[in-house]
């Protein structure tokens, strides 16, 4: 067996591109051979210095590629990103550190180029956490049972005066880039699409021999402005009794207004012979069900993590986005292979809509895991994520009022977190009403410790022994940090007030959201707000 030192990891030359492509196909368990047409088309992806291979005796046994990308953050700003792709290691060369060598080389180059973050879409969940990546967004696929939707088959045209038209691929390449740019500026976590993406998705460049040309439709408002676009294919399937069972599969659907999204979904659900629509990957809190007379006709059939992110420049990453409320946060960055070179502390202080990040003291309750805690300090301690920063340090965090908790195996009968005999220093997100307290949450390699004080009162002004009144929730372990279950009973009105970042009642606290924003369908802050805005409802 060849030793690790004898395997050469380096950028490939253009003459090695064909061998590199064949190695990538083998790594992805695809047919090794490539036609000259497809090989020539894929050369458009080649950028000198950013396609890396591992060579054993002249044979390519591992592949790695990155390319330039822009990532939208909260507030609409964009940051330069290093997008990682085409990562494979041949089965004969597993567990030899080849991925680590390629990843370290690429991330070092990304930091030198000035990229703020690195991104990827993970084929396997367990691999990339050790390189500092963490799930940043999640996605869901919906299946629509068309006969159950309740749509009137006699309906013709749109009530808002807009129209849906079929277009060809050339129209998509002309209209699509501008439409996507308008949309992604409003969606934290969205990424840019270059010209090559549009040429590949419309078949002008054929990367795959099995490419099936989709149909394309656009939505134009009553003023004639293009506000939405979709691409779809249809499976041709019939029963023995000559009944159609066709399924429309949405490749992608973009709408910059709810009216555009609604018009496109109604079109897809109104095609003759189509009994089922597969939505493709959508946001978990997508408005799709609310466009149908019977929302239950749209069911989530798949939900998973989507974009993974690794912070490369902590200061620029945190200063690029905007924040609600006022105050400061102290962060500990544990990044032994990154630019920090160890564990460092930072203080993030809000100044206007943005914030300033400067070196600061470390938090009192460091996290040992780069993932989000899933259920507060109790679960985090049991998983080994929460460690003490020293004798008595955890006790500095004010205790919270006992609240109902998630019952885990071995804790049957426990009604509150304090009944488990665990630390009462909560590490879940704290919601108003709040009179003071600490909470810590982890975001990839970044740990956040927040001191929450009332409006008009300086930090540290709480009297000794003050017992803060808090509401706690359980959190999903990812950057999208979906709220899965309220653990304190609250009337619906107070829940909406607590979860809406624009409501004045929440100005007394520093939001403890992730780097992007709340996106889960189980999160009232996202889905309720969008649904109410669409329907014209107001929060009481």
Image (spheres, rainbow, N blue to C red):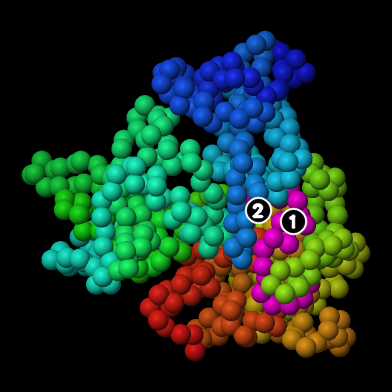
Circles 2 and 1: CB atoms closer than 8 Å: yes
Marks 2 and 1, how far apart in space? 8 Å
| Whether residue 409 can be seen here | no
Image spot of residue 15 (x, y percent): 59, 15
Q: Which residues are magenta?
A: 309-328
Question: Residue 39 got which mark?
Answer: none
Q: Is residue 161 left or right of residue 32?
A: left
2 or 1: tag closer to the N-terminus: 2
Rate crowding at label 2 as few (under 14), some (14 to 19) or many (20 or more) other CA atoms within 10 Å.
Answer: some
On screen, residue 539 versus residue 63, left or right, reads left
Q: Position of residue 6 (x, y in %)?
A: 75, 15
SS assignment at label 2? strand
Compare residues 312 and 335 and report the one nearer the observer.
Answer: 312
Residue at which label 1 appears: 316
In this view, the residue in front, 142 or 422, is 142
Q: Is residue 82 above or below residue 425?
A: above
Q: Is residue 340 magenta?
A: no
Is disc 1 surrounded by few (<14), some (14 to 19) or many (20+) residues within 10 Å?
Answer: some
Q: Quadrant of residue 234?
A: top left
Residue ID for mark 2: 79
Q: Residue at x 19, y 47 (%)?
A: 245
Above or below, comparing residue 523 to residue 66 in the picture: below
Q: Is residue 316 magenta?
A: yes
Residue for point 61% across, 41% down? 68
Tally of numbered tags: 2
Q: Secondary structure at mark 1?
A: helix
Given residues 198 and 10, the one toward you in this image is 198
Position of residue 428 measured from the top left corner of the image (x, y, whole percent): 68, 68
């Amino acid at each position: 067996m060849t030793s690790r030192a004898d395997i050469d990891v380096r950028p490939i030359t253009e003459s090695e591109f064909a061998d590199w492509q064949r190695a990538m196909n083998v790594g992805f368990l695809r047919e090794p051979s490539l036609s000259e047409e497809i090989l020539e088309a894929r050369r458009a992806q080649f950028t000198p210095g950013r396609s890396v291979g591992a060579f054993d005796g002249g044979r390519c046994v591992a592949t790695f590629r990155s390319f330039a990308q822009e990532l939208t953050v909260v507030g609409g700003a964009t940051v330069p990103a290093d997008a990682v792709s085409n990562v494979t290691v041949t089965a004969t060369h597993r567990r030899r550190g080849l991925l680590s060598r390629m990843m370290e080389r690429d991330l070092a180059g990304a930091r030198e180029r000035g990229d703020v973050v690195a991104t990827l879409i993970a084929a396997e969940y367990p691999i990339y956490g050790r390189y500092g990546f963490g799930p940043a967004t999640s996605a869901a696929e919906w299946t629509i049972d068309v006969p159950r939707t309740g749509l009137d088959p006699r309906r013709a045209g749109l009530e808002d005066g807009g129209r849906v038209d079929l277009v060809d691929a050339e129209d998509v390449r002309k209209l699509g880039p501008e439409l996507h740019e308008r949309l992604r500026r409003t969606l934290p976590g969205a990424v840019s699409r270059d010209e090559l993406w549009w040429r590949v998705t419309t078949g002008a460049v054929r990367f795959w021999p099995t490419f099936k040309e989709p149909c394309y439709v656009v939505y134009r408002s009553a003023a004639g402005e293009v506000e939405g676009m979709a691409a779809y294919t249809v499976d041709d399937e019939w029963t023995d009794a000559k009944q159609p069972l066709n399924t429309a599969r949405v490749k992608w659907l973009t709408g910059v207004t709810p009216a555009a999204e609604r018009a496109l979904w109604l079109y897809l659900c109104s095609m003759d012979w189509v009994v089922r629509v597969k939505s493709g990957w959508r946001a978990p809190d997508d408005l799709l069900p609310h466009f149908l007379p019977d929302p239950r006709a749209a069911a989530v059939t798949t939900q998973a993590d989507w974009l993974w992110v690794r912070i490369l420049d902590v200061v620029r990453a945190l200063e690029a986005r905007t924040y609600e409320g006022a105050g400061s946060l102290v962060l500990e960055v544990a990044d032994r292979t990154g630019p920090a070179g160890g564990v460092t502390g930072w203080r993030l202080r809000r100044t206007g809509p943005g914030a300033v990040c400067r070196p600061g003291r470390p938090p009192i309750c460091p996290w040992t895991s780069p993932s989000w805690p899933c259920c507060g300090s109790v679960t985090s301690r049991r998983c080994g994520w929460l460690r003490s920063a020293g004798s008595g340090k955890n006790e500095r965090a004010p205790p919270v009022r006992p609240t109902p908790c998630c019952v885990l195996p071995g804790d049957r009968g426990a009604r509150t977190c304090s009944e488990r005999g665990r630390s009462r220093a909560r590490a879940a997100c704290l919601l108003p009403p709040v009179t003071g307290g600490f909470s810590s949450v982890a975001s990839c390699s970044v740990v956040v410790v927040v001191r929450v004080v009332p409006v008009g009162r300086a930090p540290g002004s709480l009297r000794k022994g003050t017992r803060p009144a808090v509401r706690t929730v359980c959190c999903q372990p990812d950057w999208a940090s979906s709220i899965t279950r309220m653990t304190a009973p609250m009337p619906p009105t107070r829940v909406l007030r607590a979860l809406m970042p624009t409501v004045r009642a929440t100005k007394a606290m520093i939001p403890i959201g992730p780097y992007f924003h709340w996106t889960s369908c189980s999160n009232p802050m996202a889905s309720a707000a969008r649904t109410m805005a669409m329907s014209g409802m107001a929060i009481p």
